[in-house]
Each structure stands twice: as C-alpha cells, then as structure tokens.
Amino acid sequence: MNLRILPFAFSLLLAFPAIAQKPPIRITADLSEAPRKLYHAEIEIPVSPGPLTLITPEWIPGNHRPTGPAEDITGVVFTANGQTLPWRRDDTNLYEFHLIIPAGVTTLHAHLDCIVTSRVASKFAVLEWEKLLLYPANTPVANIPIQPSVTVPAGWGIGTALTSIGTGAPTTANTGVDQADHTTTPGATTTNYAATTVEQLQDSPVITGQYFHEFPLAPEVTPKHYIDVVADAPEDSELRPELLAEISNLVRETGAMYGPRHYHVYHFLLTLSDATDGEGLEHGQSSNNGVDEKTFSDADHQLIDSDLLSHEFTHSWNGKYRRPFNLYQTDFATMQQGSLLWVYEGMTQYLGNVLAARSGLKSQAQYRDQLAISAANLDNKPGRVWRNTEDTAIAASILRGGNPAWSNWKRGQDYYQEGELFWLDADTTIRKLTNNKKSLNDFEHIFLGKGGNTGPLIVTYNRDELVADLNQVVKYDWATFIHEHIDTINPHADLSGIEQGGYKLVYTDKPSKSQTTMNSARKDHPGPDVWYSLGLRIKNDGTITDIRWGGPADNAKLAPGQKIIAVDGIIFSSDAVKAAIKQSKDNAAPIHLILQTDQFVTLTDINYHGGERYPSLQRIEGTPDFLDDITKPLTTPQTAPAKAE
C-alpha cells in the first residue's frame, strides 16, 4: 500500500531530539523595504571547515512546476569572522552556491536580496519563504533546523502559522560587514519565531500590512482557526459578518467531512487588492489567498472565488498531509512527479466546491450552475481525443500558464476539473450502491483521517491505497473504475456523476443566473460567451484568444490573435455578436465578419445556425436527487448576528 509517514513525521516522532541538538540556521527576513519591491535576508549557517554547497529551493510544493526564485535573488555576500568569502555558482544546478570554509570558522553569515514583483504593494507584503531560504544542499529539508525572525515596517501587523516567541532584536546578528548599503528602515519591528525545520518554514508563509486584521473563527473548534487579512484600504480588511459566519461554518464542515485535523493552528491568509496578482496556494497550517479588492465585499462578487478558501483549506488534508508518493520529495531540488494530481488537485476541486455550498459561501443552485459550466467546458475540449486525464497530470509542469491559443486542443490543467467529475462519479456511485447510506464522506474519513489528530505530517499514498480504501466503503471494481476514467482516452467528459446525481447537462439560449452574476461582478467585463455556439473565446475588444478545434469558427479557418472589427456590418460589440447569432438561427445566410490580422483586413463567413448555447443542469424527474444531498450541510449552519436597529 506504500503507506509511509514521511520526513516531518519522522523527524517529529524519531529524530526531533537529534535535530533539536543541532545548532539551527538563523534567518531574519527583512520586509521593511517591501513597498520598494525588495526583500532582504540575514542568515547565519552553522558550518565546518572545508567545501560547502548551499542551495535555494527550485521545486516549490503546491506549484507543480519549478518556480524557485533563483533569477530574482541578488546581492549575495558570504562572510565569516569579518572576512568576505568567495563563492561560485554551480555550472549545471544554478540554484547551488559553492564555497570553501576556512579553518576555525563555525558560523557562515550570508546576506541576500530578492526582487519581488508579485503579492507586494505599498501597504502590504506576502512572504513565501523560498524567496529568501539558503541551506546546505543534499540534505533532507525536514532534517535541517532553522529559527526565523521577520522584520516589517513600523505599525504593520503580521499573520502566520509560525509560533511567535516575542518581538525585539532579530535572532541573526549584524556582522558589521557592508551588505550592499542595506539598512533596516528606521522604526521597523522584528518578531522572533520558534525553531522549526526548513521544510516546515517553507510551508509557513507570512502576510503583513498596515491595514491588518485578524478574526477568530468557529471558537468552539480546536485547534484554533483564524483569518488574517491585509488590504489596500482599511475598510477592505473589515470582513463582513456574513462572510465570517460562512468561513466559520467551513471550519465546522471540514470536521464533519474529514474527521481528524493535521495542524496545531490554522490561519487563512488573505490579501484584498487590485494592485497585485491573485493567489491560491496551500500550506499545512495556513493558506495563501489573494483576490481582487472587492471580491468578498458582497455575495455577488464573492461567487467568482466562492471555493477559494474551501479548496486551499481542504489541501491541509489532501495534498499536504496525504500526498502522492511520487509528488513528495525530501528536498526542493528533485522534480515532483504529478501522475496523481487528479487526486491531489482533482479531489480537492470536488470537495472544495461541495464545502463551499455546505458552508454557505455559495448556494446549492450556484453550485449546480458552476458545475454545469465546468462539465460543459470539459465536454467541449477536443484535445481529450488524444490526451488522457493522467497525462494532463504528468505534464502539469509544462501545461501551467502559457498562451491560450488552441489550448482546447492542447489541453491544460484539466486534472482539476476532470478530477472533480471523477470524484463526483465515485461519490454518486457509492450512494447508488448503498442506497444513499454511504458516500464519499466515509472514504474521506478513512483516507484523510489516518493517524487521528496530528501535527503537520506528511503521509504518502499510491493508487493501490485509493482502491483499498474505497473498497472499505463498498466493494466494487474500483481499479477498473479508475483506469477507465483516468488512463484511457475519453472523447467526452464523465457526466455519469451528474446523471446519477439526478441531473443532466443541457444547453439553453440564456446564461444561468450564476453566470450573469459572475460576469457582472468581474472587474474587467468579459467578451461575449460564444464558446458553445461559434466556438470562439473573445476578449471584450474583439480579440480572439482561442478557437474550438472542429467548431464553426475553426471550420471557417479563423485564427487566435485575430481581431473582430465588425459582425454583419455592425461594429464589434458583445450585443452585436449575440444579435448575429440569434438572427442566423432562422436564416440560411452565414454570419459575416470583418477581421484584422496583423496589419491586414479580411472578410470571413461563419456558417452557424444553432442559436445561443449556454450550459445548465436540468433535473431528471423521478431519480434520486443525490446532487442536492451532497451539498446539504453536515453541521448546523450558523449565520451572522442581526444588526441592531
């Protein structure tokens, strides 16, 4: 079954006394110049005389590709006993630094800077520790003790799952050596934290900001849970009582769904800003979440990212505690293999959306509407005729990001949504086989609850264990079930879970209420939704970003990057496109387009007469309504106190 309690568990249960006896690396992360897009680090590393190789992280857990910031690390200076030491970067591993430690030296001081251009703004900053970490190479990161401190501008609050041991002078001494003329901003505050390991420090991000607010959640639940918020403006960090009640419901629902918890404390870290990038990154005892400034200002804006917090929170169990055996590596230098990401991310996608509905972050109707959008997108992705779901997971590191042109033919990170449909199918299959007496919840208690309540451990699994745990819930040929859905080529999406849940995917001539709500709430208004009709993805200015392989626009030989200037003789707009589609439904004439391609203008006709098409779920009368059973709360939902008149 390949059940292994891995490095942090091992160090905690067996080797921690030995680790505790080792002198720790001491690192002070200086964020006092964050508004200038600069982070600094002062690091003291215990050393012995002779050759030494230090390394910075390359493969960051949760990123599913090599995103280490080696290119942004600058100003590297090593000193010992007041003398600067020469260093040389490795010729093939550019994350490594080679030095010779002189006789008599027991502590090496390192200074480095990192140029940071994302998740940092004038009033707040986010620290993912890999931006500043430097530690001995070729050593399991769970076996390297480290004691961190964080320096922030005066008056800024700090949110993190690290355990504070007080404020004051940083734990790293100042050597007096010129550090690229860098000095801490006057009045900055330093917070010292308890020693941990390099593995756990990387897994413990920090947010800090002038407009910082921390809210306790579900106070009756242990361990303690908090949401820490920073924003561009003070009013934005004051979260709505209704939202806080929903997130507290989420904390309660995870206990009912997963059982044991695998952290000592949990912090939702949240940035609300239009000045920085968005984010959703899991950690064992916290999650790093970033959304637009007004995303959680009301229920309508919230719908777009309604599953963000529940998704990243679920990763504490599925992805951080239970981790694929070939995705987990004992260092941050070895490639992480993604073949089981349809579990790591796919099951989390499913559970995160279910939990969002159960906790009130979205309604059951909104859950169905968004599920319809996801299922339709997968069912209209022609690339599935050559690439199976497992390959989207194996190739995750080369499928993230990139140009959207022909992405439906190439396929992308489909293991998220494919996994969501797979685990919905598994859930409804269990319910069908047991007359709704058992469900995927029973599997989660077995699979995610192994070991009971623990700290942030790592317990690996493989496919054989998934099959064995599913069979504990109900006997079935789960090995074949997985093989047919994950390993084989499936020209159509797995809609069995939706249909066993009592619904079917249909297309209507009007968008769902949820789709309309999300479009209205988007900061940048989207272009017309004609993917299921013309087979085009279009920006609001008429630029074509993708074309559905084999669809009407593809048959008309349109190309990504072209810009629609006019539709049926009318200047391009969303309304003009929709009007042309409606008129063509009862008209044999094609839709006429004027296109700009580079510096040229061309005329093209699209022969389409199917009208507007938007995905929706339609109830199948006379069948069990498992889909709504799945999204019913398992606990008693609580609401925000009524406002005083």
Image: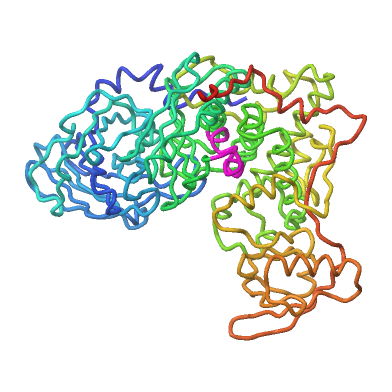
Q: On the rendered structure, is 288 left or right of 569?
A: left
Color style of the picture: rainbow
Q: Residue at x 70, y 84 (%)?
A: 602
**Residue 128: x and y, percent?**
37, 41
**Residue 122: x and y, percent?**
32, 50
- Find the magenta span and give its range: 298-312
**Residue sitting farthest toward the front:** 645
Q: On the rendered structure, is 325 left or right of 610?
A: left
Q: Exactly how many numbered labels are in the figure?
A: 0
Quadrant location, the N terminus: top right
- Based on the displayed image, in which of its 4 quarters is residue 108 positioned? top left
Name the one closer to the observer, 90 or 520: 520
- Based on the displayed image, in which of its 4 quarters is residue 372 positioned? top right
Dominant SS in magenta:
helix
- Based on the displayed image, in which of its 4 quarters is residue 230 positioned? top left
Name the one closer to the observer, 125 or 379: 125
Q: Residue at x 27, y 32 (%)?
A: 148
Relative to 206, does residue 182 appear above or below in the rendering?
below
Q: Is residue 565 magenta?
A: no
**Residue 94: x and y, percent?**
34, 54
Q: Residue at x 38, y 46 (%)?
A: 232
**Residue 588: x and y, percent?**
91, 74
Relative to 585, does residue 7 appear above or below in the rendering?
above
Name the one closer to the observer, 356 or 500: 356
Q: On the rendered structure, is 417 left or right of 69?
A: right
Relative to 396, does residue 136 appear above or below in the rendering?
above
Name the one closer to the observer, 143 or 115: 115
